[in-house]
Amino acid sequence: MAHSLWRCGRHRTGAVFELFFRDNPFGGGFTIFAGLQNSCANVSLFLCLSLLTCLSLSLSLSLDPVFVCVCVSYVNASPSLSLSLQVALMEVSGPLAVVQLLETPLLNLVNYASLVATNAARFRLLVGPRIKLFELGLRRAQGPDGGLSGSKYSYIGGFDYTSNLLAGKLYGIPVRGSMAHSYITSFTSISELTFQTLKPVGDGAAVDFVGLSERWLGRVCRLLEESEEFPDAGERAAFISFALCYPSNFVALVDTYSVRRSGLPNFCAVALTLDELGYRAIGVRLDSGDLRQQSLHCRSVFRACSQTFEVPWFANLSIMASNNISEENLKELQCQEHEIDYIGVGTNLVTCPLQPSLGCVYKLTEVNGKARIKLSEDQSKTTLPGRKNSYRLYSPDGHPLLDLLTLHSEEAPRAGEEVQCCALGRKMERLQVTAANVEPLLSVYFERGQVRASSAKLGAGVRGWGAGGK
Amino acid sequence: MAHSLWRCGRHRTGAVFELFFRDNPFGGGFTIFAGLQNSCANVSLFLCLSLLTCLSLSLSLSLDPVFVCVCVSYVNASPSLSLSLQVALMEVSGPLAVVQLLETPLLNLVNYASLVATNAARFRLLVGPRIKLFELGLRRAQGPDGGLSGSKYSYIGGFDYTSNLLAGKLYGIPVRGSMAHSYITSFTSISELTFQTLKPVGDGAAVDFVGLSERWLGRVCRLLEESEEFPDAGERAAFISFALCYPSNFVALVDTYSVRRSGLPNFCAVALTLDELGYRAIGVRLDSGDLRQQSLHCRSVFRACSQTFEVPWFANLSIMASNNISEENLKELQCQEHEIDYIGVGTNLVTCPLQPSLGCVYKLTEVNGKARIKLSEDQSKTTLPGRKNSYRLYSPDGHPLLDLLTLHSEEAPRAGEEVQCCALGRKMERLQVTAANVEPLLSVYFERGQVRASSAKLGAGVRGWGAGGK
């Protein structure tokens, strides 16, 4: 298309596109707009590459060498949280050939980012501010890059941690994880531990950790009235090896054989041994079965140990749950008593099964100052012609009343003055509204080939919302 | 975990993992295993990077410098089409620390690849061999890399084309597309065409294309008994500009204003003008409304033009359809008469909304020659312990009877000899089977740090299935 536009001399014609969506995802009432920083970075890169291409092509005659160099495109974008449908998330203006080429990249960078950030926010709203959420989706994402996007935009949407080390490294997201089941099943007995001692916190000689933990196992089993024979020795060896390596970051996956009869007694024995040497374990992870019941049981055992062995912090050990967590089973969980502090979500976070795509579109609204429209047999797909401004109108007590679309040529609404408007798609329904406060929704983020807002600010602004929810 | 394994001296212990899934996706009866080539390439890269890391770490003492260099891991993998659940798609064996680190990368590279290839194959099976399928999913994929995976594995699953130019460039997938609605709405009148002539095929002076096409429009409108006033001049200008640029590759998007009253007459006028100059247009694309009815109408118009204007090829112009195509509406379409030759699928192909993730897992089956198991309260999540071989047993007429799992230490089944076996999960149900032919399912693809099969062969083998379906 760009080549064809150049052939008929229209590549530099000024054009304005709008990027917007028609329905909030998941049948919900909001969408978090994400992907702006990445979009700006990519438009910037695209313009640089285009410039290089133009220079290299200046030797041939197949494309006009000044094709892109003259570009002054700019991106107007709305803040991170969008409430109204059909209000542009982005307005992109510049030479027709350039801004048309940006359609697919911008849709690719905004659609999934906004979808997964919104999905993450729904999880956050569901669990409230107390529970920590960690993202575990890399295995089910669309390749490595899909996994990185999942981690980044889940964090923006309100998650606390990711298990994706590279995402932690690249985006500064706090990383959390525990061990794999295979780590545990790879051990069969205590004798496999070639390294069995640990130095106490502060000064002191290394002590026999294995011997100490065996004694603690006996005490724990007597307290819980469980047989000392049952807790799997291989599982205990795995826990000990992990504790010796990370004495201040000990988290154990306790459901490999049996939470109640093996994982939990083994964990308590190792964690109490750590306590004796001055370290504090972090907690346990549950990954199968009835997570709610198991969490109640874990907490009661932690409290019993705390009281019996006089270790106050033991009652407050963290309990992490994962295993196909979805909105639906979280809703159920939240209605009942449970003791889970951390929830890990993978598949149902990054693949968004309730609606795995956001339908953002990128439509031409103006060419050479003239409004343009796309008609459709499907009325909802007909575009709103003309370049527009958008404003959020607030009531005196600070609540948003509505988002107002105006033509770009119209005057901005003013606080305290009555505005006549009509509801989208219902032309006959006139409204009068007087706003106590008017907020313009579009700001310039990219202009004359440069990102205007600092990228740090972009990231911080977006993250602010998620953090505010907690 | 790897660090911890090194600390307790178990990083070089021999281990075997299996990568498998428990249920076919989309409630279907098969899964196409894809992602093997990419997995081998990434394991190779991983080992190189690990080696570099080890060298750089040899200056510090935080990790053992010979940690990975000793690696001789290998990947046994089954062919591209897998029919039985719990049969390993991959067996990965090598030093425990190394093969454990491969869990997440391999799951990431196989899960989505296999899911989308299977989804693509379902579309192919639904439409049969005649209709061409093109992939349009980039805008809804999980970032740019997700889009590339979508294109690549849709092609492997049986699609013919992609609209993703980079995928075409990187993987050699044939690329197809047409114009955007915005390309059409960016034109308002014929006067915007600064370039209005075209040379006929072969020799001859450039002729006035615009004048010729206006005359053809008159003839077409008289034939169709439509007003000559209605076809949008801007749309026609867009079609002409595209035809002048690509006279041998002219495809027009005809639903911007009205297929019947504007898009189709405009297309016919331009395509008949091309014919007069010796070029053949390719066809039209429909992107909204009742695609089936529109395709019937388009075909009847093409036939009428073909007969009236004596242009035989015009009756066979291609009709392409897109617009939220799903398995469900394709099933409906296939039950009725239609004239669609090409179908474009985007969102419902790459995001796999019927089931947006495949649940492949990666489980430890053997350490140091000893079988290992992961138990679970959820019976279906308990693993099958021990290293295994798998065979496909065939009947005398070449039909697969069953896939047989044996322990690695057991003898392979032989053709013509009765085998006693039992159905997975139903130990009491004994079967006797005598196979006319026995095919081992696992082959070595990666050994001693090297990809063993050539990557070209890997790709070709996998693609073979999709192509065979047509």
Image (tube, coloured by chain):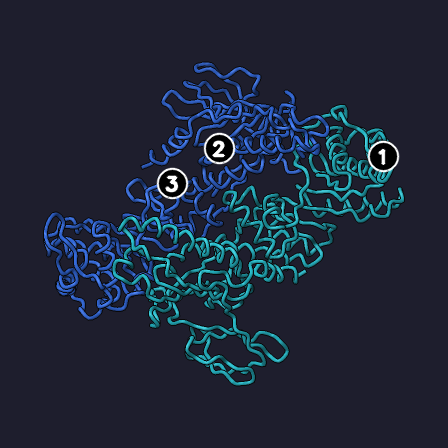
Chain colours: A blue, B cyan
Which residue shows up at 57% across the image and 51% down it? Answer: B152
Whether residue B36 appears in this view of the structure is yes
Residue corresponding to mark 2: A41
Vertical position of residue A363 compared to residue B463: above or below: above
Residue B79 image-quadrant placement: bottom right
Vertical position of residue B448 compared to residue A95: above or below: below
Whether residue A375 appears in this view of the structure is no
| Residue type pointed to by label 1 | Trp
Residue corresponding to mark 3: A155
Give how far apart the Cα atoms at labels 1 and 3 are.
Answer: 59 Å
User: Looking at the image, which is closer to me, B33 or B379?
Assistant: B33
Q: Residues within 10 Å of mark 1 (few under 14, many from 20)?
A: many
Question: Which type of secondary structure does the marked residue at label 2 adopt?
Answer: helix
Which residue shows up at 61% across the image and 43% down it? Answer: B165
Vertical position of residue A23 compared to residue A245: above or below: above
Indicate left or right for B100 with A192 as reference.
Answer: right
Which residue shows up at 76% across the image and 28% down it? Answer: B233
Residue B393 image-quadrant placement: bottom right
Question: Which type of secondary structure does the marked residue at label 1 adopt?
Answer: helix
The subunit letter for the residue under badge 1 reads B
Give how far apart the Cα atoms at labels 3 and 2 are.
Answer: 19 Å
Indicate left or right for A348 with A338 as reference.
Answer: right
Residue corresponding to mark 1: B216
Q: Nearer the viewer, mark 2 or mark 1?
A: 2
**Upstream in sequence: badge 3 or badge 2:** 2
